[in-house]
Amino acid sequence: MKALKIPKSKKVPGLFTYCTECQKRIGKEICGDSGKSIDSCKSKDKHIFKLSVSVPNTSTVKTKNLDTRNLREATKEAFRFREELEESNFEIPQNESDIPEDFKYILLVDTMKMYIDYLNNIDVPDHLQKDRTKRYINDVARTFRKFTRALKNSKFNLELFRVDQISDSIVGSFHNYLLEVEKYGNKTYNKHIATMRQFIAWLNEKKGYAIANPFKGVRALPTIERNETITQKEFSKLLEVITPENSKDKRVKYRKYYYKPWLIGAFKLALYTGLRREEFLTLKWSSIEYNEEGVPILIKVPNFKVIRLQNGKRTEDIRTKWVPIIPELHKLLKNELEMSKHQNTQRFLIAHDDERNREGLILFISKAFGHFWNVTGITRKVQLNDLRNTYITELFKAFGDSAAVITDHSDIKTVKKHYMKAKLVSEAATGFEVFKNS
């Protein structure tokens, strides 16, 4: 008797081959018992076609063992089985199904997909949905790819590997893979481990699984908190090298150019507002408020971080912070960004005509900053976010704890005392200059 197989060209969703002897799914024509080619399996007579259909909006899976060994008949049965399920709203007679006691997905790749769907709010009730960035979700997906790659390196069959098989030894292999193969630093290592820990915890706490979470016992590697700032001289040197001639990244083989005519304005805006990337890149001229004389004094900025923590429910007072328009920022808006032309419009302050979406710009601008910083020849390592650090550092020098109202750092004890006067404190800061005492 020949081994049961499904050619790639004839695969049907939900239809797969299964061995009732070793009680394992046959993946990539590999015997689940011996790990060798399925043609060498000694239990070919125990091979069957099996159907698996996911019930929409649940983690339930309906399955059925087929009596036929004919692929054409099995294919017809697969479509008929799905139609019957849909017609009966997925309530099928017991004598026509082989329903396992545990309805939850158990294969690792299936549970990972389920978690990514959850992060994307797919089939998640409105009141439980959270606003997550594409970057965060992509980071989780990247961790999953690294983990499955580590499993492959250890010769595990991903089509058969169950999530409950993750053990201390497997976590140890992942630990070695991150440090020795990928050669990640401590911070990146900790991030990958934390993501896997959260994933297993989610399966247990939110989806009713009862499996061990060996990632809980992994100790975080020590990291050094960065708190770099940039001097006026360094910033000036950075701006000087932002030219088309210095645009090409010579460290990579393919052509990569980082120059954009709006970069200088973007870096200045980052420094003179102290905002995060997604905040200053999404500022519009309509967000600027003026006094009675028509002088711009404040920029109204949505607090994206708080918005996501509050699950997207709009409470304007909590979600808005006021950025004072300091003299350096006023000069930038008036002279370089041409405020008189765009005042009160829905036009972005930065890169309005760039065809990429804002998330694409967020990734680009960090790389562009790193590229041009390297061009300066300054050996000290500085990142785009250090412009924000510089602003906040100088602001606290000038205003003490009251500056927390402007920077929106709620972990400072005095914020509660000053919060109701946040707008007034911000207005009082309009005479502040980042490099005033340099």
Image (cartoon, rainbow, N blue to C red):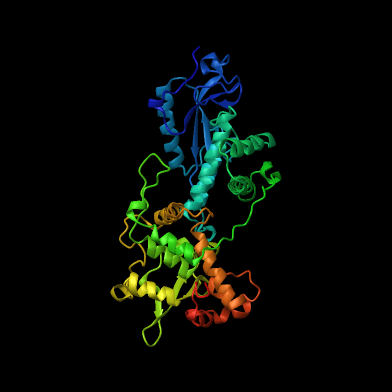
Residue 8 x/y as whole percent: 41, 26
- In this view, the residue farthest toward the top is 1
Closer to the camera in the image, 315 or 56: 315
Instruction: Using the rendered image of the protein, determine whether residue 232 is visible from the camera's viewpoint.
Output: yes
Q: Is residue 28 above or below residue 110?
A: above
Residue 353 x/y as whole percent: 30, 60
Closer to the camera in the image, 372 or 399: 372
Q: Is residue 31 above or below residue 404?
A: above
Residue 244 x/y as whole percent: 33, 54
Q: Is residue 55 above or below residue 244?
A: above
Residue 133 x/y as whole percent: 48, 55
How many numbered circles are shown?
Answer: 0
Q: Is residue 98 above or below residue 70?
A: below
Instruction: Using the rendered image of the protein, determine whether residue 302 is visible from the camera's viewpoint.
Output: no
Closer to the camera in the image, 134 or 29: 134
Q: Residue at x 56, y 18 (%)?
A: 36
Closer to the camera in the image, 142 or 338: 338
Q: Residue at x 55, y 41 (%)?
A: 111
Q: Residue at x 59, y 74 (%)?
A: 397
Q: Residue at x 56, y 38 (%)?
A: 182
The answer to which image quadrant residue 98 occupies is top right
